[in-house]
Each structure stands twice: as structure tokens, then as C-alpha cells.
Image (spheres, helix red, strand yellow):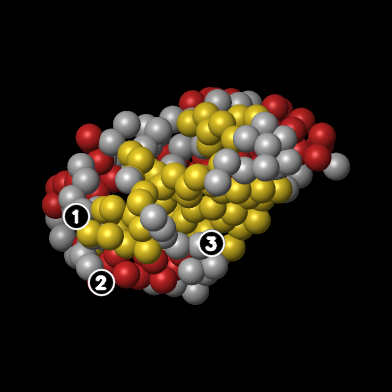
Amino acid sequence: MLVEEQVPDSPYVCLKWRALADHAGVHLGVAMEYWTFFFRQEGGKTQVIIGAPHAQMLPLPYQAGGAYWGVLLKAHLFMPLLSKHAIPKEGVQLPVQKGYILIAGQKIPLPSYENTEKFIEDLVHKKIIVANPLVEKALSGTPTFSERTVQRHVLQIAGLTRRELAMIRRARRAFVLLQTGRTIAEVVAEAGYTDQSHLTKSLKLLAGQTPGQILAAYAQQD
């Protein structure tokens, strides 16, 4: 599986990625604090899946010759027409007809990887995706309302508390650091864990792997 990631210059997208599969397998996705759009192209057919924030790993099967891409929305964005609590952890598949996605009663052209940011911008302009400035300030560490109000808004958008979101964010950072070959001791220090046991417990819960297993997988890629 060849994976490419990009941090675009976008007010709405924090990360976009794409992958080409040269063999069949299952990718274990880690816990996610963002709403996501996932595009799967297999056997000439394209599927579009919306994912909500979730606090557990998610197995994602892929096929040889398949093409996959997606975006992670910034944490203060959400879809008011979809309740996070009504979305299963594997996401909700949207209908696709003749090059269009049917969403919120509207037909939206199916995007390519290259114009995915424009696709998200169009959804924001149509108010299918909405930004919550209060949550944006809260997650950046500068809340302007009471803690109770902030928690209520964050929970409404993500279905998770700020503490849970911070835990997921830290585990994702640790996961990425380990994939770059950092030692366990370095990751404990850089990601802000108290010790190796704390790191291991967090990664097993949110990524389904121990630090040693993640490092071993990294070593096999060399």
C-alpha cells in the first residue's frame, strides 16, 4: 500500500491523503478526532463514506488495484444534518449516481483527489458542513465561554469530551512518531506521556497495537 499525505492550505481541511493498493489486505485505522470523507474506488465503482470522530481502532479492508483518498476536516467543523451518535464507527455510505454524490437532498459532483478541498469548500458554502467558532477557540486553548458551555458544544460536534479528544490527539502523535523510527523513550517524552506503560496502554486502546509492534512494522518497511 503506497500512501501519500498532504497538509493543504485550507481553512477547512487539516489533512488529505491518497493510497494505491498493490495487494489486498486490511489497514488498521487509529482513533480519530475529526469528521472525515473517505473515497474508495474498486472495480470501476466509487464509494463515498462519511466518518465521525471515534475512540477506537477501525479495520479498513482494501483490494489489489484499488485507489483510495480522503480528507480530515478541521476539528471545529461538523455536519448538522447528521448526528454523530447516529453514525456507526465504520461510517455512513452516501449514494453515488452518474458522477454525483447525493447528500442532504443535493447532487454534488464527485471530486477527484486533486480537487477535494474545493469539494469541501462547496459543502461549507451550501451549509452542509458548518464551522463552530466557539469550539475552534476552545480546542486552540482560548475559550471565551464557561467550561460547561464549551464542553456541551464540543460534545455536540464530536460526540467526545475535550479530554477524550486530547487523548486521541496525543495517541495519534505518538503513533506517527513511532512510524518515523523514534525510540519508545523519545516518544514518551515528545508526546507527553508519564512513562512507557502509559504510552502502551493508550496505543493499545486507540490503535490496537503496542509501541513495539508499531516499531516492528516500521522496521519491516526498510
Q: Nearer the viewer, mark 1 or mark 3?
A: 1
The one of 215 and 24 positioned closer to us in this rendering: 24
Q: Nearer the viewer, mark 2 or mark 1?
A: 1
Which residue bears the numbered disc 1?
105
The kind of secondary structure element at disc 2 is: helix
The residue carrying pointer 1 sits among few (fewer than 14), some (14 to 19) or many (20 or more) residues within 10 Å by Cα, namely: few
Residue 222 position in % (x across, y down): 85, 42
* Amino acid tagged 2: His
Residue most extreme to the front: 98
The one of 179 and 58 positioned closer to us in this rendering: 58
Q: Residue 134 bears which disc, if any?
A: none
* Amino acid tagged 1: Gly
**Mark earlier in primary sequence (3, 2):** 3
The kind of secondary structure element at disc 1 is: loop
How far is the residue under mark 3 from the one under mark 2? 20 Å
Q: Residue 113 bears which disc, if any?
A: 3
